[in-house]
Amino acid sequence: MGKILVVAGLVAAGVGALLMLGVPLGRLPGDVVYRRGNVTWYAPIGTSLLLSVALTLMLVWWRR
């Protein structure tokens, strides 16, 4: 449980650092935004795929 919390904290700190540097997480190609009238629907598909691949690679590396 301790390792998971450390990894989660490092990931959160890394994402925060990337956002502070201006990396456009949440506005990547593949992210869908639908606006019509007073309704806005947002589906971060591209961001989700990128984070999934990054976390998978990190966890595979961590287990070896």
Image: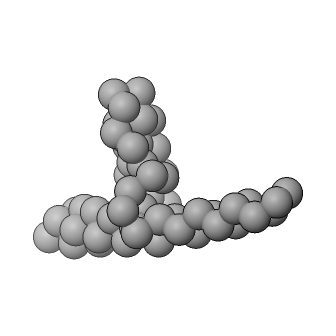
Residue at x-position 53% and y-position 68%: 32
Left or right: where 60 falls relative to 10 = left
Identified at 85% across, 57% down, the residue is 38
Q: Which of the pair 38/25 is nearer the observer?
A: 38
Residue 38 makes an appearance in the image: yes
Rendered image quadrant of residue 20: top left
- In the picture, measured across the screen, residue 52 lies left or right of residue 42, that is left
Q: Residue at x 36, y 62 (%)?
A: 29
Colour treatment of the image: one colour
Residue 45 at x, y = what percent?
A: 47, 71
Residue 52 in view of the camera? no
Vertical placement of residue 8 versus 13, above or below: below
Instruction: Determine whether 9 is above or below 4 in the image.
Output: above
Q: Residue furthest front?
A: 37
Query: Residue reaching furthest top?
Result: 20
Q: Where's the C terminus, which quadrant?
A: bottom left
The percent coordinates of residue 62 (x first, y second) are 22, 63
Residue at 34 percent of width and 39 percent of height: 23
Q: Is residue 23 left or right of residue 8?
A: left
Residue 33, image quadrant? bottom right
Estimate the x, y position of residue 52 in percent, counting from the top left: 37, 70
Question: In the image, residue 13 lies at what x, y percent?
Answer: 42, 37
- In the depicted view, which residue is nearer to us: 56 or 46? 46
Query: Viewed as shown, does residue 36 lie left or right of 10?
Result: right
15 or 63, which is in the foreground?
15
